Amino acid sequence: MAFAIVLVAASGYGAERTVTLLFTNDFESAYDPVPAYWRDDIENIGGIGELAALIKRYRATAENVFLFDAGDIFTGTLAKRTKGELSFELLMSMGYDAMAIGNHEFEYGWEELARQKNRVAFPVLGANLFYRGTDHPYAQPYAIVERNGIRVGVIGVLGQDAGTALIPSNIAGVDVRDPLPIVREHVEYLRESVDLVVVLTHQGATAPMQTDDEADPNVQRGNEENFALAGAVAGIDVILAGHTDAGTREPLVHPETGTLVMQTYGQGQHLGVLELVLDESGQRVSYDGDLLPVVSDGLAPDPTVMAKLARYRAAHPDIYETVGYSAAYLSRRYYEESDLGNLFADILRTETGADIAFVPSGALRKDLPLGQVRRVDLLDAFPFEDDIAVVEVSGTLLRAILEQGLSLERGMLQVSGLVAEYDPAQPSGQRLVNVRVGERPLQADAMYRIATLEILAQGGDAYTQFNDVESREYLERPFAQVLEAYFAARDVVRVPARGRLIPVDE
């Protein structure tokens, strides 16, 4: 370890030094500013060009700036069209120093991600990811980033629960192992040769990509798993997190280890900033952190980033074609029945003739506008590659599937073809009160045909009940194409009737 000791001594110039960590998470291809309808101080928020401009401003004024991302840069039309290429390209133009792999990075399959992550100069980290059944790392586990003699060791991990929030076959070639012992090993190895150890985590309970995450505490799933990691592994200076949308207005501090934990609300609406002051021996003297809103109207978009985005958009002009019209604004919600969820479930049932249709709330990624609906609007609302599937289940298994949705572990299950009354005050697994399929009460021994998406049919997104279905058929019809055909075949798409998932107070 003599070499490591020399490095630390060389970086400690005999005076205090300030280090600025900038960070993002769960960007999910939110490239354009959106109306900040939940705030009274900002008209528009976000935008990747505006975020890049804010990052440049910090680099010009702050000391020793490092830029990290905690995963989920994929999702959205252009990410899908380019298999994630554009997402990586934009981060490269913005000068990221490292990122962690999130669950959405597997949207186009583990083999495609293995190729795409090698196109960028910065490390794409996944310390606890291994090729299935081997000890061969799937991704680079850690990196050392050095700037002005200050060395930061960066480790990336994907949570085991987060690794289930996707189509199982998309990650079939990769094992997601318990990150704790792996992080501990790498921290011990890095600690003496760096000034700071930063862990980029994409873990915890799954949260939605909901536009007003910042204002809805119900969808912010907390930082418990990150706090547990901070307490279990000594030597971590900072955890920059993703996946749970649990924004931290100021750093959380573990009372025993002193590890700082921060996270943004996602979608590029905030830039996370953590400023650390280190003394001459490398010990932390003070810190200050905040989440800065990306005030779109007050920032001129970065021209380099916008030029690259424009080139990719120009290569896919068809996505801006009008495919139909909507009679109303169709919104999505994570923990309740929604207009968009009802519509998509109805389209599934219409397409297949099934008795029932299910759509997971996590599959709804963007609201649809009133009036003109472009192809990009539909593809952003459902940016995944799932085929439609039809499964056959008993009434008993159907009840278990509905109870899983009512647990809210992965949001409310959006339905068509049934009405369910439930008591949210009851324990998970005991919330169903009444279920009617069509015009008849649910029968335990009856068989029902359910149309759904590939992710659920494979038992993904925590719906393991689908592993026990009587039969399973994949129709080889991508749901995204079915959506477009549905809109194109109608003059105007109407808002479906509500009243399918009814909370009651017993």
Image (cartoon, rainbow, N blue to C red):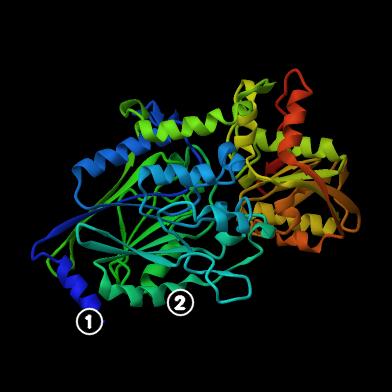
Front tag of 1 and 2: 1
Relative to 371, say whether 134 is above or below. below
Residue 18 picture location, percent across and down: 17, 55
Residues 123 and 252: in front is 123
Image quarter hosting the N terminus: bottom left
Relative to 97, say whether 86 is above or below. above
10 Å neighbourhood of mark 1: few (<14), some, or many (≥20)? few
Circle 2 residue: 181
Residue 212 picture location, percent across and down: 47, 37
Residue 443 picture location, percent across and down: 88, 53
**In which image quadrant can residue 430 be found?**
bottom right
* Disc number placed over residue 2 in the picture, else none: 1
**Residue at 60% in and 26% down:** 317
Asked which secondary structure carries label 1, the reply is helix
**Residue at 50% in and 37% down:** 211
Asked which secondary structure carries label 2, the reply is helix
Type of amino acid at the residue the image marks with label 2 = Pro
* Disc number placed over residue 112 in the picture, else none: none
